[in-house]
């Protein structure tokens, strides 16, 4: 079956612009996670959804970051007024439920110039 | 707060040699523990997980890991490394904190020499 997909695969944006990153989880997976991976770094937890609600938003780095999930499926991570330090690979993962195995998407590489 | 430490940033082993990657975690209750692998140009893939029960768990690709509560460790092992095992390995701990959060270690990059 289809895995987790993310779009776009690459995004180059100018500092100060807003960006939207999309994640399509595996059908039927109730849990969805967003992570950020900076060059040479591990994965930084951003936010987790159970259904459409986000019980834990503690990982969002600033109020410029927001995320939503609709219909228990697609999720969008929005970064407003992008800064150069936002440049990273943003990874999305989904799982059937917590705490089961997470299936990762290929990521969106964001470059802020 | 939960944390995961992978003390080795990178490790080099010869093909055919044994491998052990270290992972220490900090969490107040029984954790959910995972090892993931990220191969060049590939996404992250689960190698194995520990939730409860037998403390020695088997995973894919011939990997195993042992949960040692007294040492707060979950080290990954493989008896004989193949060149295709060269990748980045991440240890992770899952914790229920209102919701469910997974904390990843910084990763260990494995190099395999012929």
Image: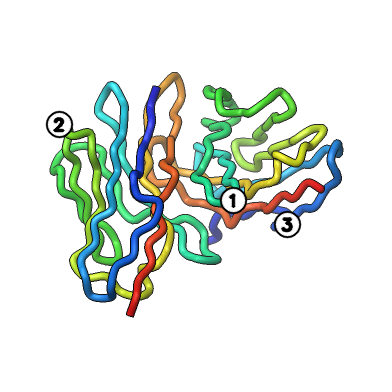
Q: Do discs 1 and 2 share a chain?
A: no
Chain of the residue under the numbered disc 2 shown in the image: B
The residue beneath circle 2 is B70
Q: Do the residues labelled 2 and 3 touch (CB within 8 Å)?
A: no
* Residue at the image position 38 percent from the left and 67 percent from the top: B111
**Residue A98, horizontal then vertical, whole percent:** 41, 35
- Residue B18's place in the image compared with A15, above or below, is below
Q: Is the image coloured rainbow, by chain, by secondary structure, or in one colour?
A: rainbow
Instruction: State the CA–CA distance, disc 3 to disc 1.
Output: 15 Å
Chain of the residue under the numbered disc 1 shown in the image: A
- Residue B30's place in the image compared with A91, above or below, is above
**Residue A8, horizontal then vertical, whole percent:** 73, 54
Name, please, the residue furthest toward the bottom: B114
The residue beneath circle 3 is A10
B20 on left or right of A75: left
Neighbours of disc 1 within 10 Å: few (<14), some (14-19), many (20+): few
**Residue B75, horizontal then vertical, whole percent:** 24, 48
Look at the numbered disc 3 and give the secondary structure of its residue. Answer: strand
Instruction: State the CA–CA distance, disc 1 to disc 2.
Output: 34 Å
Q: Residue A39 carries which label?
A: 1
Look at the numbered disc 1 and give the secondary structure of its residue. Answer: loop
B67 on left or right of A71: left
* Residue at the image position 29 percent from the left and 62 percent from the top: B60
Is residue A28 something that shows in the picture? no
Instruction: State the CA–CA distance, disc 2 to disc 3.
Output: 44 Å
Q: Mark 3 or mark 1: which is in front? A: 1
**Residue A100, horizontal then vertical, whole percent:** 37, 41
């Amino acid at each position: 079956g289809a895995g987790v997909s993310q779009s776009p695969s690459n995004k180059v944006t100018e500092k100060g612009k807003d960006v939207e990153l999309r994640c399509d989880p595996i059908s039927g997976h109730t849990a969805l996670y967003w992570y950020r991976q900076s060059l040479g770094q591990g994965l930084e937890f951003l936010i987790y959804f159970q259904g459409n609600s986000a019980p834990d938003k503690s990982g969002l780095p600033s109020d410029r970051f927001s995320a939503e999930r609709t219909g228990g499926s697609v999720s969008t991570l929005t970064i407003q007024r992008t800064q150069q330090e936002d440049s990273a690979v943003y990874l999305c993962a989904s799982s059937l439920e917590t705490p089961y195995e997470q299936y990762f998407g290929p990521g969106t590489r964001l470059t802020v110039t | 707060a939960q944390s995961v430490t992978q003390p080795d940033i990178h490790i080099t082993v010869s093909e055919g040699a044994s491998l052990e990657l270290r992972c220490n975690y900090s969490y107040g209750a029984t954790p959910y523990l995972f090892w993931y692998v990220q191969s060049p140009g590939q996404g992250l893939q689960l190698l194995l997980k520990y939730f409860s029960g037998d403390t020695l768990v088997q995973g894919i690709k011939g990997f195993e890991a042992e949960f040692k509560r007294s040492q707060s460790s979950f080290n990954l092992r493989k008896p004989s490394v193949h060149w295709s095992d060269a990748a980045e390995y991440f240890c992770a701990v899952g914790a229920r904190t209102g919701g469910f959060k997974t904390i990843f270690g910084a990763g260990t990059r494995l190099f395999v020499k012929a």
